[in-house]
Amino acid sequence: MKVTPQSIRVGTQMLPAQGGFLLASRALELLGLAFPADWPGYARTQGLTSPERDFGLGPEPTLSLSEFVRLGFESQTPQARRWQKGAHKLLARMLAGDVRLSAEIAEANPDPQAGRWLHARLENQNARKLLMSTVARHGGSAEVYGQLGSISNASVLGMDSATLRRERGVKSTRDGLNTEELLRLSYLESATASTIEGRSAHGNAAILSIHRSLAAQERRTWQGQAGGAGQARQGGVVGRPAGAGLAGTGSPQQTG
Amino acid sequence: MKVTPQSIRVGTQMLPAQGGFLLASRALELLGLAFPADWPGYARTQGLTSPERDFGLGPEPTLSLSEFVRLGFESQTPQARRWQKGAHKLLARMLAGDVRLSAEIAEANPDPQAGRWLHARLENQNARKLLMSTVARHGGSAEVYGQLGSISNASVLGMDSATLRRERGVKSTRDGLNTEELLRLSYLESATASTIEGRSAHGNAAILSIHRSLAAQERRTWQGQAGGAGQARQGGVVGRPAGAGLAGTGSPQQTG
């Protein structure tokens, strides 16, 4: 059996981990808890259901990250209290929107594609904001925002956002998009903003007409159909990144 | 007095906030706690020391984010228990390096420069990794990594990293850098990696000599001194972003 060593940083310590599960003995030690002589009994009492994993010495008990967090808050050892204090600080920083914490979390992800996804997601937010402010300056009214989004989604994702959220099991649409989809949406919405500006378009009908036409054109470009409706631009071909997306990256998923 | 409305998202709710302080009445309500008739007494008992702020109806009590988090964990109302469960999930996602959470935190930051800083910081990490792997492939030994970093720091930051951490009050050097400094370091380290590769340089001495010379050259470019040591490149001038950096962005700092 191939043993893939991994680790997860908790405070200043690196805990051995396999596929998002912590080696229970080391995780308990960090919280100042003795490893129980009767693990199955302890696990039953505490409601711990994580699978055993091989860390190089045969199968050993593990804790999922949510089990670890739960035990951390339930325990009253000096070590657990110290951990709780650190957790409180992290939560306060999260509420404050601390981008340094944002960077630390991204850096904790072992997947090299994760950073790319985050870039694409942040860029997508910028493109969206730019489009919205351009539309506002060019006489677009409130309902046009939703319509622009619907056109983008139908063209790039091939479905509406409610369907996407249901199919991909996410609460927020943007969380369900892979890197490639985010890139295409950013590109399309930037192109629309720049065309509205360039043509001094005004009002909902003009704005929607531009967006519909660019959406169709972007889709043809992405599908490798050069030419098209007689106004295809040269040099606008976006490279198709291989293996884009977060799916199947092996980053641990929490459901607890 | 000018009232600047703000808000901080907690779970699905937006709580009124001023400069990182939550309106106490609404924050307590979220936790299912009645607003105490005797606020000064309550504040004393609970060790709450946040200043009053004006939310439009005259000065009102506030909670800092760490005070809110502490009360959230100490309270046992159904609402507080629900909040605690959400907090547990967030901590598990943080440990897992969930980049979606990373994006959510960045998006919670009202400062438009925050996203730019995060981009620069992530890019800096990529540039650093690329340099390290290039050095390893070109016969650099273990001690050269630290020396390269020292040269970069002295040239771009004008001080060593220990001094920087002390002066700026950060634990990790990269957290103390502003957007401009991160950009310059990424640029310099990418240029060194590409030159090592292009010249097929080999061994510590050759690598360090390239890095020293490019560091001096980058510094001259940044300071607007074209020409220089007879080998200045054209077209390599990096734009000088105005108002770069996170300093003074008004993002709430947590010290609790």
Image (cartoon, coloured by chain):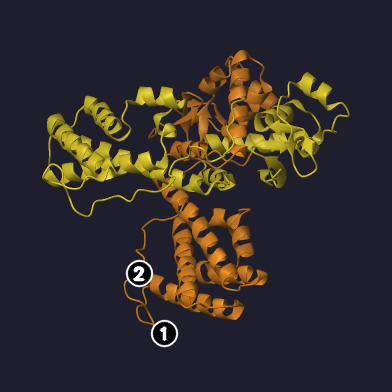
Chain colours: A yellow, B orange
Q: Is residue A204 above or below residue B214?
A: above
Assign a secondary structure to mark 2: loop
Q: Do the residues indicated by labels 1 and 2 lie within the same chain of the protein?
A: yes
Residue most extreme to the front:
A1
Residue identifier under label 1: B229
Please report the residue visible at 82 percent of the width from the left and 33 percent of the height from the top: A33
Asked if residue A133 lies left or right of residue B188, the reply is left
Mark 2 sits on what residue? B237
- Residue B40: image location, x then y, percent: 62, 23
Visible in this render: residue A31?
no
* Closer-to-camera residue (A188/B35): A188
Secondary structure of the residue carrying tag 1 is loop
Check the picture and name the quadrant holding the N terminus of chain B: top left
* Label 1 crowd (10 A; few <14 / some 14-19 / many >=20): few
Q: Chain of mark 2?
A: B
Graded by Cα atoms within 10 Å as few (under 14), some (14 to 19) or many (20 or more), the crowding at tag 2 reads: few
> Which residue is found at the position 78% from the left and 24% from the top?
A43
Is residue A175 rendered to the left or right of residue B38?
left
Q: What residue appears at the point 17 percent right and 50 percent down from the top-left corner? A: A233
Kindly identify the amino acid type of the residue bearing the numbered disc 2.
Answer: Val
What's the residue at 30%, 35% (across, down)? Answer: A156
Choose between B61 and A240: the one closer to the eye: A240
Residue B147, how many percent across, how many down? Answer: 61, 72
Where residue A62 appears, as percent x and y from the top left, is 73, 33
Is residue B216 in view from this perspective? yes
**Residue B4: where, in percent of width, then height?**
39, 34
Chain label for disc 1: B
Answer above or below: position of B151 versus A173. Answer: below
Residue type highlighted by circle 1: Ala
Labels 1 and 2: the sequence-earlier one? 1
How far is mark 1 from mark 2, CA to CA? 16 Å
